[in-house]
Image (cartoon, rainbow, N blue to C red):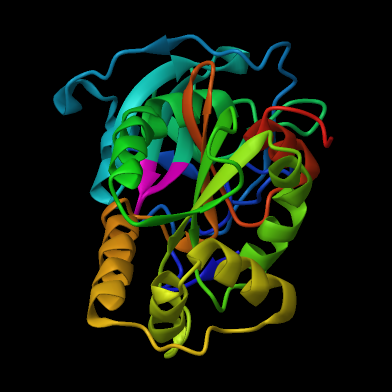
Amino acid sequence: MTLFSTKPLLHEDLFSQSPLPIMEMISVQTRNPFSASFKTVIALAASLTLPVSLPALAEDWPAPIKQIETQGLTIHGEFDAPGGLKGYAASMRGQAVAAYLTPDGEHAVVGTLIDAQGQNVATTTLEQLVYGQRNAELWQQMADHHWVRDGEADAPRIIYTFSDPNCPYCRQFWEDVQPWVESGQVQVRHLMVGILKADSRQKAAALLAADDPGAAIAEHYRNDAMPDNAGSDQSEQRVDENTQLMRDAQLHATPVTFYRGDDGVHHVMGAPRPDQLRAITGSEAP
């Protein structure tokens, strides 16, 4: 994953299959909860489906959860967690993180709770509570912005992805998704942004200004080639608008890829793993 801004405090992909060592006990009397050493907590959960509750008023949160809010986290809702814990879906700088309240109500753990198989027990719940509404709104905004089509116009599945011309992971995603694109199953809509290097904006604008932007992007990712033409004022403005949309959504990496599933709009940051690629495309490789 390629970062273009100061690395967030909670900087790992919390939807990873791997456990993340970013947990810490927080009590009512705690000092800064993110300055002490981290601990890992393992839960033997029987199920990954966690009942969720509508957000309560901030003044209703237990004291340790209020302490978490003072550290800059936003609490979006609560859910039932394994082991008698109460889970809270939170975010910081646009990134989701879970907090777990102990049964005595006096302590909280911030980070990833895993089951016996090493799976994050709150992946789906966090996405629903933290990203659900934002992703639905962003889907429509992306449709109204400046994207370049890769694939058949009548492909049954549409994917949006924020791409920087200098991003190696964007190139990797382009290569990985080509079997679905070439078979006519998937249409990828690239929103070109300029965030990684000094010439990213200029390159993105040149790709958008090409006679055939889709072919230009393919040639760039395939052979590292750029169109002979320079970007126009209009194409530079379009790149700026795409970049601003990404920043407004508090997205901190390229690529960021969005797809619509049966239960709403989801996103994947970075070059997708094989299981994520199947979810994005909706099928096994053709």
Q: Is residue 35 above or below residue 49?
A: below
135 or 208, which lies in front? 208
Quadrant where the C terminus is found in the figure: top right
Q: Position of residue 205 (x, y in %)?
A: 38, 77
Residue at x 62% of width, y 15% of height = 83
Is 93 inside the magenta-drawn segment? Answer: yes
Q: Position of residue 30 (x, y in %)?
A: 36, 48
Q: Main secondary structure of the magenta part?
A: strand
Residue 195 appears anywhere in the view:
no
Q: Position of residue 75 (x, y in %)?
A: 30, 34
121 or 223, which lies in front? 223
Q: Is residue 161 above or below residue 156?
A: below
Residue 284 appears anywhere in the view:
yes
Choose top left, top right, bottom left or bottom right for residue 132: top left
Quadrant where the N terminus is found in the figure: bottom right
Q: Which residues are magenta?
A: 91-96
119 left or right of 24 in image:
right
Residue at x 24% of width, y 74% of height = 234
Choose top left, top right, bottom left or bottom right for residue 157: top right
73 left or right of 11 in image:
left
